[in-house]
Amino acid sequence: NALASQGQYAEAARYYEASLRVKPEQSAAHYDLANALNRLRQTEEASVQYWLALKAKPEFAQAHNDLGILLARQGKLDEAILQLREAVRCEPRSAAFHLNLGKFLAARRDVGEAITCYNAALQIAPDNADAHNALGSALATTGQLNDAIVQFQEALRLRPDNVITHLNLGKALAAQGQTEAAIRQFTEALHLKPDFAPARLELEALTGHKSQ
């Protein structure tokens, strides 16, 4: 809808509501209304519309994904994971759905299954920097630092300006005692984003003095 694409979400929501009054069983209209309401931060109403979209079209993978993201933001992690599992079941070739499921599983500390999801995402999209970074973080959590470092380095090859990945790589290097290499990563993160407090704190911890 042109209104939504122009950021006019309230007007778009009224348009979708009018369309649904004429024809209530439109899964796409329920989904678009949910997205507009979500943009307006009317999350409970958005959730209802996602469910109605799925009632009209149970195999609507993107609606499962987006509902899962909304539920996760509401702190309903178990419910979010169920929705992402459905998204993956409906559309198993979506790297984004595998990645999102992995992130929610990692947040629930199901790190082993999260690693499986990240690997699945990378089988589909080997150049997905976010998946490499997420896999590196999960591997670091389990103490597999060498493998984690490889993943962070690949993520930075694909997206060298990602400060979070520089931070993650620096922390993994520091955990291995590679202090100078870690300092370079934290310094680069601060070069890219001077107010990036996590990198500044890590750098100060390694150097023993306040960074400028």
Image (cartoon, rainbow, N blue to C red):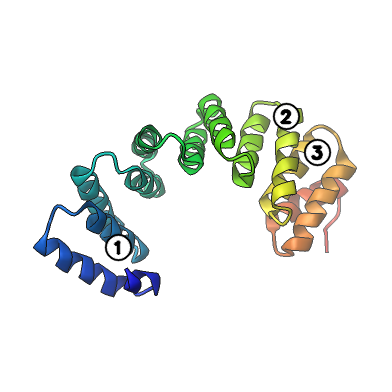
Judged left or right of residue 2, residue 211 is right
Mark 1 or 3, which is nearer the eye?
Answer: 1
Mark 2 residue type:
Asp
Q: Residue furthest left?
A: 22
State the CA–CA distance, disc 1 to disc 3.
44 Å
Q: Is residue 175 above or below residue 207?
A: above
**Label 2 Cα neighbours within 10 Å, binned few <14 / some 14-19 / many ≥20:** few
Q: Answer with the quarter of the image where residue 23 lies.
A: bottom left
Instruction: Give whichever of discs 1 and 3 has the lower sequence position.
Output: 1
Residue 205 screen position, x and y as percent: 80, 47
Mark 3 residue type:
Ala
Judged left or right of residue 90, residue 26 is left
Determine which residue is flagged by label 1.
37
What's the residue at 83%, 64% (across, down)? Answer: 212
Determine which residue is flagged by label 2.
147
Instruction: Give whichever of discs 2 and 3 has the lower sequence position.
Output: 2
Q: Nearer the viewer, residue 17 or 166?
A: 17
**Label 1 Cα neighbours within 10 Å, binned few <14 / some 14-19 / many ≥20:** many
Mark 1 residue type:
Leu
**Label 3 Cα neighbours within 10 Å, binned few <14 / some 14-19 / many ≥20:** some
In the rendering, which numbered label is found on residue 174? Answer: 3
Residue 134 screen position, x and y as percent: 60, 39
